[in-house]
Amino acid sequence: MNKQRVTLAIDNNFAFVTLNRGEKHNALDMAMFKAIDRISRQLKKNRNIRAIIVQAEGEDFCTGLDIKSVMSNKFSALSLLAKWFPGQANLAQRVCYNWRKIPVPVIMVIQGRCWGGGLQIVLGADFRFATHDASFSIMEGKWGLIPDMGGNLVLRELVAKDVALKLTMSAEIISAQTALDYGLITQVSDEPLQQAMQLAKQITERSPDAVAAVKKLYQQNWFKAEWLILAKESYYQIKILLGKNQNRAVKKQLNPKEDVSYLSRKKW
């Protein structure tokens, strides 16, 4: 029986997604692309989860594309890029882009090498916690390619344009500290999983509707016109006020000792 490329465990409304090909440094073959796509789409439909933590087995988070496996079959390579409409995400892009569409915080826990497709995956998250010895690279330029897995959407939000150009054109390998200085990751830690759990628990103390609304507001409107952001703020606030979780948030603040739990989030 083939080993599962990616595993999913849900515990107390937290989802733990684990890249499970540590013996191959979690290099991306077709099975792993499909598994990440399937699990992330599955999690988007689950209104009970409150946070997602993505981690990896072994010494490296992901060293990028499994060139030998994917490129040995030209039809596999083409299936990664196939799409019906130019603006639609293909399979290669969905392993990054899908995380942005899930209305709960997605936190990546990174160790070792996070190169090429690995970096594209983590760029899709809301937060990135890395060990001190982690390294990062937009590696596609080494192979005469451009990054095409959707991470460019996030790269423009995180770093200055000249930094993005430098990293992408040079395929330079940078340290975790440099990645932090650039704004590419959120935090460097001796215990990134513990830090990720701490943040996830802190966020789950807030209304899931408010968290989902903030994520959607920022992800979809960060570079939009001022009038549109103002309109979306008002619309989302009204939607929140018409729900029951906002009342529960008020009760939790006014009566901290009272056991008030949130309902499943609205559909966002």
Image (cartoon, rainbow, N blue to C red):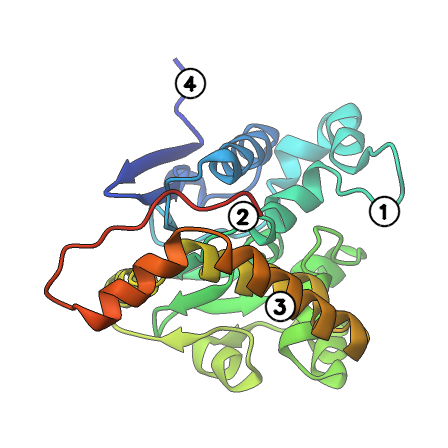
Q: Which residue is at the front of the view, 199 or 36? A: 199
Residue at 72% of width from left, 63% of height from top? 152
Q: What is the quadrant of the N terminus in the image?
A: top left
Residue at 60% of width from left, 44% of height from top? 95
Q: Is residue 252 visible?
A: yes
CA neighbours of label 3 inside 10 A, class few (<14), some (14 to 19), many (20+): few
Judged from the image, the secondary structure of the residue bearing numbered disc 1 is loop
Q: Are marks 4 and 1 in contact (CB under 8 Å)?
A: no
**Dot 2 or dot 4, earlier in sequence:** 4
Identity of the amino acid at label 2? Ile
Please provide percent x and percent y for residue 13: 30, 43
Q: Which numbered circle lies on residue 102? A: 2
Where 176 falls versus 109 (above or below)? Answer: below
Identity of the amino acid at label 4? Asn
**Dot 3 or dot 2, earlier in sequence:** 2
Q: Which residue is mark 3?
A: 218
Of tags 4 and 1, the one toward the viewer is: 1
Q: Which numbered circle lies on residue 2? A: 4
Judged from the image, the secondary structure of the residue bearing numbered disc 4 is loop
Q: Are marks 2 and 4 in contact (CB under 8 Å)?
A: no
Identity of the amino acid at label 3? Tyr
Identity of the amino acid at label 1? Gly
**Dot 1 or dot 2, earlier in sequence:** 1
Q: CA distance from mark 3 to mark 2?
A: 13 Å
Q: Are marks 1 and 3 in contact (CB under 8 Å)?
A: no
Q: CA distance from mark 4 to mark 1?
A: 34 Å
Of tags 2 and 4, the one toward the viewer is: 2
CA neighbours of label 2 inside 10 A, class few (<14), some (14 to 19), many (20+): many
**Dot 3 or dot 4, earlier in sequence:** 4
Q: Which numbered circle lies on residue 186? A: none
Residue extending furthest toward the top: 1
Q: Which numbered circle lies on residue 87? A: 1
